[in-house]
Amino acid sequence: MELFEKCITLPYINAENEASFAAERRGSALEIWFEPSKGAVDWRNNLDFPARAYGKWFAHRGFVRVWCSAERYLGGLILDPAVRRIRVVGYSHGAALAVLCHEYAWYHRPDLRDRLTGYGFGCPRVVWGLAPKDRWQSFTVVRNRDDLITHLPPRILGYTHVGSLLEIGVRGHYSPIDAHRPENYLKELKKCGFF
């Protein structure tokens, strides 16, 4: 629960394309946080879901655009050899960016793969088609059951979740929109005692 509370209350830095992130360094540990949607630019990127190439696989075009803006600022932190542990956390739009940031750290820091973790609360689908699933072995998508955003873009369009899926809450307790609200994630996280 502390991870989620911190994610929704941190002050964030805004970069190009409204990439909103925070980074904290404690000794050799690096934590990277991504903010949920907060304005019209974020929503335009959320809805720009045609797949585009990202390396040798495909991902949601709007999220890739925003991640590439954040990467300019975060890449150097991730690549710093003094960093020995990385945790990436995001909520909603920020969770999608956390998926891409986690993969970036996995790819560029093979020495940290066993000390890399990621959490995406209310995470939309980011990856399209087939992608190497091992890149997200330590990434957890946390879904409040019935959360509409976690079912978008639709699977029928070729999108999929990566990492492991942890469902919280009770099916039918919230509407698909209410299930995504931060206060309801907090309620359900308190009940289950995770994070």
Image: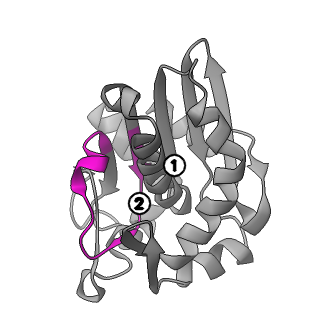
Q: Is residue 103 visible?
A: yes
* Position of residue 153 measured from the top left corner of the image (x, y, whole percent): 38, 80
| Quarter residue 16 falls in | bottom right
Residue that badge 2 annotates: 123
Task: Name the colour scheme.
Answer: one colour
* Position of residue 74 measured from the top left corner of the image (x, y, whole percent): 65, 43
Characterize the local packing of mark 1: few (<14), some (14-19) or many (20 or more) Cα atoms within 10 angstroms: many
Is residue 20 covered in magenta?
no
* Position of residue 173 measured from the top left corner of the image (x, y, whole percent): 28, 62
Q: Is residue 63 above or below residue 194?
A: below
* Horizontal relation, residue 60 to residue 143: left or right: right
Q: Is residue 72 above or below residue 111?
A: below
Q: Are marks 2 and 1 in contact (CB under 8 Å)?
A: yes
- Residue under the image location 26 percent in, 76 percent down: 129
- Residue under the image location 53 percent in, 20 percent down: 29
Residue that badge 1 annotates: 90
CA gap between label 2 and label 1 equals 8 Å
Q: Secondary structure at mark 1?
A: strand
- Residue under the image location 25 percent in, 58 percent down: 132
Is residue 131 covered in magenta?
yes
In the rendered structure, find residue 186 and report the number of the disc placed on it.
none
Characterize the local packing of mark 2: few (<14), some (14-19) or many (20 or more) Cα atoms within 10 angstroms: many
- Residue under the image location 59 percent in, 60 percent down: 67
Q: Secondary structure at mark 2?
A: loop
Magenta residues span: 118-139
* Horizontal relation, residue 75 to residue 59: left or right: right
For marks 2 and 1, the one nearer the N-term is 1
* Viewer-proximal residue among 155 and 148: 155
Q: Is residue 195 visible?
A: no
